[in-house]
Image (spheres, rainbow, N blue to C red):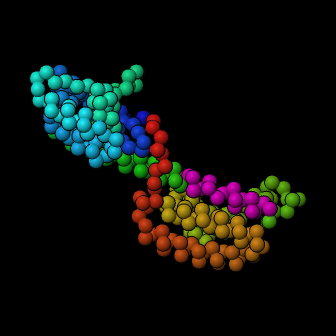
Amino acid sequence: MNKLVVKGIEIRTKKVNSEDYICISDMLKAKDGDFFISDWLRNRNTLEFLGIWEQISNPDFNYGEFAIIRNYAGLNRFKISVNEWVEKTSAIGIFASAGRYGGTFAHKDIAMEFGMWIHPEFKIYLIKEFERLKAEEQKQLGWSVKRELTKLNYRIHTDAIKTNLIPPELSAKQASFIYADEADVLNVAMFGMTASEWRKCNPDANGNIRDHASVNELICLANMESINAVFISKGIPQKERLLELNRIAISQMKTLLEIPERDLLVSENKNTE
């Protein structure tokens, strides 16, 4: 569970079916005086907003019950809790949970609207902080994609080298030179230099040449690992493989560079945290 920090107040967030929800109970700490979520929920404007949001976002929303609730909004005796709202209308935009880590969570669209009730300034800071959090998540996602791409075809590539290029009588140390040599075939085809040449050009950099590759470059590199494994199994000489892999790298990078990297970073996390 991630946290936003708005004007010194920690506000929890969580993913629900891949959607961002923000704890509006935590947001209440920024409100001067006594103020409760039920006070906000009983307001007619609030209910109108929630109803429209649910109609757009929730195919199971109970319009009949919503109409009844809306008719009572504004009356002094009218009051409704989050749980009652959800139970009667099958709403998905807001929910309350009990327990140590419980609270009332609202979809980010609704939480931003709630922020306006706290204070207009608070809403602005909330939006800015949420944007910062999403930018950090995007960076983390990019790192995860890179990590998975690096592992994706590594085994296929090394198995092809082991089966076709390494004689069984070689020691582990001798075999490691062959693995490194084949890794450099890909490095030269992709980056135009070997790993050692890159280190000489970048003595102060952390990691290796692939750690500093872009997502597009790593996608291309992962593809080339599979292709090189096929070339190796067919007995194609290294020089010929290098030339063909370089042509493939140029062709694939031209295509990938036409696609913004953000469009390649699609989150597969659809589980409720």
- Which residue is at 49% across, 60% downward? 215
Image coords of residue 226 (percent x, y): 65, 64
- 149 relative to 156 in the view: left or right: left
- Residue 198: quarter of image: bottom right
Residue 142 vertical position relative to residue 47 in the rendered view, above or below: below
- 81 relative to 235 in the view: left or right: left
Of all residues shown, which one is farthest toward the right? 169
For the C terminus, the quadrant is top left
Q: Nearer the viewer, residue 202 or 185?
A: 185
- Residue 133 in sight in this render: no
Image coords of residue 244 (percent x, y): 64, 77
Q: Nearer the viewer, residue 259 or 90?
A: 90
- 2 relative to 201 in the view: left or right: left
- Which residue is at 56% across, 52% downward? 147
- 12 relative to 264 in the view: left or right: left
Query: Tag count in the figure?
Result: 0
Image coords of residue 92 (percent x, y): 34, 37
- Residue 250: quarter of image: bottom right
Image coords of residue 131 (percent x, y): 31, 47
For the N terminus, the quadrant is top left
Of all residues shown, which one is farthest toward the front? 64
Specify start and end residues of the magenta stretch as a single range.
147-163
Most common secondary structure along the magenta stretch: helix
Residue 161 vertical position relative to residue 21 in the rendered view, above or below: below
- Which residue is at 57% across, 72% downward? 249
- Residue 224 in sight in this render: yes
Q: Is residue 2 magenta?
A: no
- Residue 193: quarter of image: bottom right
Q: Is residue 162 magenta?
A: yes
